[in-house]
Amino acid sequence: MSHILFQVPTRFIDLEEANIVKYIADNRSSEAIKLQQPFKYFGRIYNQIFVNNNGFLTFTEPLSAYNPILDSARDIIAPLWTHLDNRRSGTISYREETSNAVLAQVTAAIKQYFPNIPFAATSAFVATWDSVPYYNGGGVVTFQVVLAYNVHRSFILINYGDVAETGQPWQAGYNTVDSASSFTIPAAHIPELLSSSNINVTACWSFHLTTK
């Protein structure tokens, strides 16, 4: 299994090493990544995750779509769903972390953003797109999504680093199979995405997922 060491931007979860998505190809996903601890997503429990090259996570199967459609009635988490191409450069990586140091960092972030919700992470799944180019050229993107969870509560944490502006279609947010729980970050352009937040931390978004 391949690994990579990261020099990550401030606010990103800094992993000593991470597993590389091995598919250097257009519109591909990782193989099914088995979770040490199941992840509860709006009441459904998943034991695996797929990391897609085009900037999103799915749970039941890989998805090759590059045109972002968040209202597609599937469980999906999309920090930045757009057409990306890691064949030229960049790295897409992931890791499920249960180490005390990383869990403490994740727990501290969630407590800062949701001070009225008691929480201590027992697992964190971290996926990072590091300097991955857009398919049509014109710049690269760097962002990270963290699934922070225990048996009772789940959170999403999205951090944006350097993200070039693009004319390609893109969306960011999440959706569920019945679309009963969904959210699209309300930004029309990349600069607006990078200057916005729902937790008063620029270029950072976080969500508490209900588990009913």
Image (tube, helix red, strand yellow):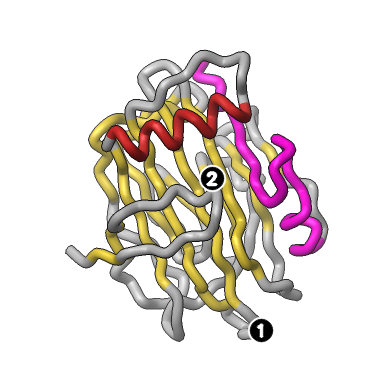
Measuring 69% from the left and 42% from the top, which residue is drawn there?
Answer: 201
- Tell us which disc is closer to us: 2 or 1: 1
Tell me, yes or no, whether the highlighted magenta stretch contains residue 92.
Answer: no
User: Counting residues from the N terminus, which is met first, the one under dot 2 or under dot 1?
Assistant: 2
Q: Residue 186's spot in the image, x, y percent?
A: 79, 47
Measuring 72% from the left and 74% from the top, which residue is drawn there?
Answer: 166
Tell me, yes or no, whether the highlighted magenta stretch contains residue 199.
Answer: yes
Please tell me whether mark 2 sits on a helix, a strand or a loop: strand
Q: Mark 2 points at which residue?
A: 77
Q: Residue furthest left?
A: 1
Dot 1 amino acid type: Gly
Q: Mark 1 points at which residue?
A: 138
**Depicted 152 relative to depicted 106: above or below:** above
Given contact means CB atoms under 8 Å apart, are the residues at marks 2 and 1 in contact? no
Give the spatial CA distance, label 2 vs label 1.
25 Å
For the N terminus, the quadrant is bottom left
Dot 2 amino acid type: Ile
- Taking the image as shown, residue 200 lies to the left or right of residue 105, namely right
